[in-house]
């Protein structure tokens, strides 16, 4: 498939794609869309930023419009289900769906972190398409606010991350609620044995395509790193790098731990300096406000944990900065994939200690990525630190990073941040020891 025009899409969808400037499909779209339009089950491998969201949304929208979909079966039964590992990705998929689908194709994103009553109310008029995280989907289905027996079209996006987050049992329970007669597609950045076993239980005689084999990053992204002598120079270097993007370009900075995100964002000046922060500790409303400000350009920099490493598509992100060596290669790849979107160029930069350099070079050799060490530039002066607000609106720290709350007599001040008190430090990446699976928040 050379162009979308070859597909003879419905006029509304064709016009929307043209307005968005999409004429030629990406490799995964070219491989997946014709098969999906034929009604085939599909097992597809594609790296982050390759355009796979439209690879399953275009056939879904086309089918809904041509068949004149309406909620079928019971009063609460949608026609299509898209599974996503994180609330950010679920919201991103629904945003893309709304961008290209006509208003008659109704949809709802269902995810944790918000009062479940909001979803109960929205499901009183059931949508044609539901996009959701496994935990919240089971919650609303378990209370009979959502009936999955009328599902005809199922997509599992980022299947490898779904398993990494410990959602296998939830996925198996969801599959038991679906009808056996359906079209199913599974998208993953890797084809591990666990993914293939899951695909065998989900798919029937699937077509298989791997246009971007292996864990890789887009070729439009350059990789480089700095080695710094101290933690203070690490923060100062990040501030210096944030001054370099051209007007309109944005940056993302990733940290491994939540307390580092809060501390770094505050040290960079916070929102007065157009710097926002996102971690798993922020409420869903806070995360949505920050992401909206970042997408609109009001925030030039977003500091985040891996909660923002997938599902966030902001084309104006020109550089991704890693505050330290990521915990594993997959994390590095997906963080890096937040830049270089839609075939644009981008850069990923790491700030490393001398001890981390050896580990990083071993990692990029395994990923077959070319990188180079850069000379430290002249470091810019840091802005005044922003206060870190508590939930009651008061600041926990004074301007020098100390606890501003008066201590009671005999009370010791703890020098370790609350987030890591009594826990273990960051574990570095090891080639012979993969990261342990964890269950994420849905």
Image (spheres, grey):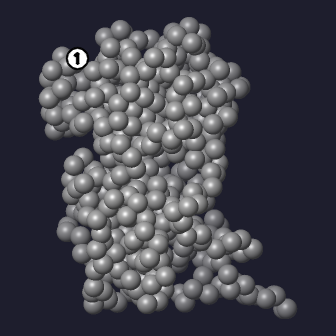
Q: Quadrant of residue 368?
A: bottom left
Q: Quadrant of residue 70?
A: top left
Quarter the C terminus occupies: top right
Looking at the image, the residue that sits furthest to the right is 410
- 11 w.r.t. 348: above or below: above
Quarter the N terminus occupies: top left
In this figure, which residue is indicated by the disc labeled 1? 10
- SS under mark 1: loop
The x, y position of residue 94, in whole percent, is 42, 35
The x, y position of residue 208, in whole percent, is 38, 27
The number of discs equals: 1
The x, y position of residue 240, in whole percent, is 31, 81
- 303 w.r.t. 51: above or below: below
Residue at 57 percent across and 12 percent down: it is 180
Quick check: can you spot residue 295?
Answer: no
- Residue nearest the viewer, comparing 366 with 291: 366
- 146 w.r.t. 366: above or below: above
- Residue nearest the viewer, comparing 399 with 238: 238
Residue at 35 percent across and 20 percent down: it is 36
Q: Is residue 438 left or right of residue 205?
A: right
Quick check: can you spot residue 337?
Answer: yes
Residue at 56 percent across and 16 percent down: it is 77
Q: Residues within 10 Å of mark 1 (few under 14, many from 20)?
A: few
The x, y position of residue 326, in whole percent, is 48, 66
Residue at 71 percent across and 25 percent down: it is 143
């Amino acid at each position: 498939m050379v162009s979308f025009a070859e597909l003879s899409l419905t006029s509304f969808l064709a016009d929307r794609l043209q307005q968005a400037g999409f004429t030629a499909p990406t490799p995964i779209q070219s491989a997946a869309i014709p098969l999906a339009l034929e009604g085939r089950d599909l097992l597809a491998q594609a790296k982050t930023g390759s355009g796979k969201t439209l690879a399953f949304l275009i056939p879904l929208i086309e089918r809904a419009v041509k068949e004149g979909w309406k909620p079928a079966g019971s009063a609460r039964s949608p026609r299509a289900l898209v599974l996503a590992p994180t609330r950010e990705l679920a919201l991103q998929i629904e945003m893309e769906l709304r961008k290209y689908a006509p208003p008659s194709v109704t949809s709802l994103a269902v995810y944790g972190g918000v009062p479940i009553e909001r979803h109960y109310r929205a499901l009183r008029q059931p949508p044609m398409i539901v996009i959701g995280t496994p935990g919240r989907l089971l919650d609303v289905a378990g209370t009979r606010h959502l009936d999955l027996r009328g599902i005809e079209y199922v997509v599992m996006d980022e299947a490898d991350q779904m398993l990494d987050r410990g959602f296998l049992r939830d996925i198996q329970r969801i599959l038991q609620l679906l009808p056996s007669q359906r079209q199913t597609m599974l998208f993953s950045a890797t084809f591990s044995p666990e993914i293939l076993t899951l695909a065998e239980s989900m798919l029937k005689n699937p077509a298989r395509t791997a246009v971007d084999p292996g864990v890789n990053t887009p070729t439009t992204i350059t990789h480089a790193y700095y080695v710094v002598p101290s933690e203070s120079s690490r923060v100062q270097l990040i501030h210096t790098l944030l001054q370099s993007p051209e007007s309109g370009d944005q940056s993302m900075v990733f940290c491994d731990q939540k307390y580092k995100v809060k501390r770094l964002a505050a040290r960079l000046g916070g929102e007065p300096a157009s710097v926002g922060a996102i971690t798993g500790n922020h409420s869903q409303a806070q995360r949505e406000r920050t992401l909206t400000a970042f997408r609109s350009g009001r925030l030039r920099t977003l500091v985040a944990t891996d909660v923002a490493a997938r599902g966030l598509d902001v084309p104006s992100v020109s550089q991704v900065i890693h505050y330290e060596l990521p915990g594993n290669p997959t994390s590095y790849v997906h963080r890096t994939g937040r830049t270089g979107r839609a075939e644009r160029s981008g850069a990923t930069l790491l700030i490393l200690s001398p001890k981390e350099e050896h580990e990083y070079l071993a990692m990029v050799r395994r990923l077959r990525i070319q990188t180079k060490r850069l000379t430290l530039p002249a470091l810019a002066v840091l802005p005044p630190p922003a206060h870190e607000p508590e939930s009651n609106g008061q600041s926990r720290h004074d301007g020098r990073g100390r606890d501003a709350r008066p201590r009671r007599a005999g009370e010791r001040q703890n020098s370790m941040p609350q987030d890591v008190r009594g826990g273990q430090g960051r574990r570095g990446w090891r080639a012979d020891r993969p990261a342990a699976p964890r269950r994420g928040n849905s």
